[in-house]
Amino acid sequence: MQTYYITRGRLIPILGAGILSCVLYTPASAMCPGPNFFAAATSYPTGANPTYVATGDFNGDGKADLVVADSYVSSGGAGSAIAVLLGHGNGSFDAPVLYPCVSRPRSIATGDFNGDAITDLAVTNQGAPYVSVFLGLGSGGVGNGTFASAVAYAAGAGPFHIRAADLNQDGITDLVVSNNSVAAVTVLVGEGKGGVGDGTFAAPVSYPLNNLSTGLAVADFDSDGILDLVATENYSGTIALLRGHGSGGVGDGTFAHAVHIAAGPEPFDITVHDFDGDGIADVAVANTSSGGIAIMRGNGTGGHGDGTFLAPSVLSSGNSAQAVPADVDQDGITDLIVTVAAAPGSIVVYRGQGTGLANAAEFAQPTTYPVGGDPIQTALVDLNGDTKPDLAVPNYFDDFISVLLAACVQDPRAPVLTAVRDVPHDQGGKVFVTWTRSSLDVQGGPVLNYRVWRRIPPGMIVDARAHRSGSRVPWTARWGPRSSTGRRSPRCPRSGFRAMGTRRRPPRIRSPRATRTPPSSSRRSPTTSTCSIRPTWTAATRWTTSHRSAPATSSAR
């Protein structure tokens, strides 16, 4: 059986009793079968000892550009800079243009700090207690790819990672920094008025941690509408959660004392993502010293987090510096891209299996891509305009950035989802799904049937197979009582539950009845199939469709 995943999920409530996740919009031909998700790396010079990279359209030409932190400091103290590489839109770049920083720049955040609609930069300086702010230059809300000289703002000792977010919800971007020379995180509130920033920042306010910090993320973990902070505590084996203060769902830019949560032997970086699709923020913590990736599922009910986490499940991945969640193969299931800091270094892709477990068992065996020496961060961005995510990886030991372009091979034979429509207030959660039939679907061809199914954690599957008629006219199938005719006309035949790892058998769903589509404009387009489905279950996670193939010698049913 060859399967073409053609969907991504959209959550639709059914009678208030649960959630149906319905197919939405991802074309089948976009799905990448792997294992060659990315082409071999191409190198572009950056300057000395690049560490972190950020992306954006700095000159308003619609093409992705890069900015890299070059952390080298010569014996005379000179050399620290950021390097701006303007993109050509095909995965290649101009020579780097350098802008001096204070000392050993590390992390870069982008945002519009002064309300002119032009991208600005904020850069941490690990060798000095400052953040360097570079305001973007241009006119009429369009940048020209250059930046003003840096202005330094105090940010605590050894600022390492930086995030830009509106922490007090006044419409002005603020900054938050993890500190690596003192155990703290530091907040710099953006200045301005009327919701428009002026490009300056208030005096820093620091919040103590248990240990020195590198990784940092911002999210709402307790579902109160107020942003919280989570930071790694490198040598304590913990992450620190600082809940945001405020009222009525509006933060005031201050934070509670840190709560410390076990997260692996040496947490270095942290990423927030909803791995299990329950609407609650989870985290993936990259542990150096071969500690792997700790995946920690957020606790809560009904899609509302309570600010606590389940114990970590560890994905073995070597000396992990970062884990980036992404849908690399475009099947609607989260994959992980892990940066392994070594000499030589590598990027490792773990393909998600869609189990809904939100732990290490979610991912298949890895595919490894070599890059340069000692990478610690990867940026995911479309660099060549093909809508697929590419990778940009700075290499500290080798003074260049590795660019890995997406190399998915599309299969034009796959069916393509053309429309999905849910019917509101129909007292049954009816959903209409329309797709083009596969080019393999010809008389005597290998296609036996199309199948639409629904996945329910922890592994139960409800499926229905839609056989087409010999004349291959469009068909419409509806969930309902079993057909008494027993004929092989276009229908969704007998359906039921297949439960794995459960003792109680769920309620049986009766087989559906199908009717031919009446004469209409759709009948004149025999390459389109529509299935109207009225499920009687709840709490779904995903609808997908598959194409089932047989040996070429088989005749079509």
Image: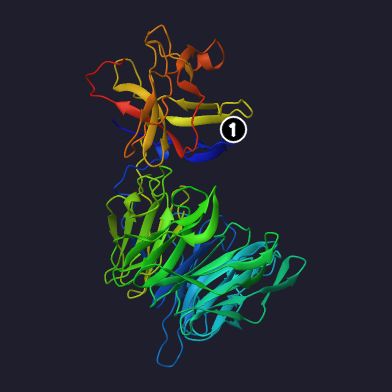
Q: Where is residue 333 shown, x and y percent of the image?
A: 41, 45
Judge the density around disc 1: few (<14), some (14-19), many (≥20) Cα neighbours within 10 Å: few
**Above or below for 557 versus 167:** above
Query: What residue do we see at 34% from left, 52% from top?
Result: 38
Label 1 SS: loop
Q: Is residue 444 visible?
A: yes
Residue 401 placement: quadrant: bottom left
Q: Where is residue 552 shown, x and y percent of the image?
A: 24, 22
63 left or right, relative to 506: right
Q: Amino acid at mark 1?
A: Leu
**Above or below for 369 versus 137:** above
138 left or right, relative to 182: right
Q: Where is residue 452 shown, x and y percent of the image?
A: 42, 28
Q: Quadrant of the C terminus?
A: top left
Between residue 402 and residue 481, name the one nearer to us.
Answer: 481
The residue carrying mark 1 is: 15
Outermost residue toward the front? 504
Query: What residue do we see at 52% from left, 25% from top?
Result: 534
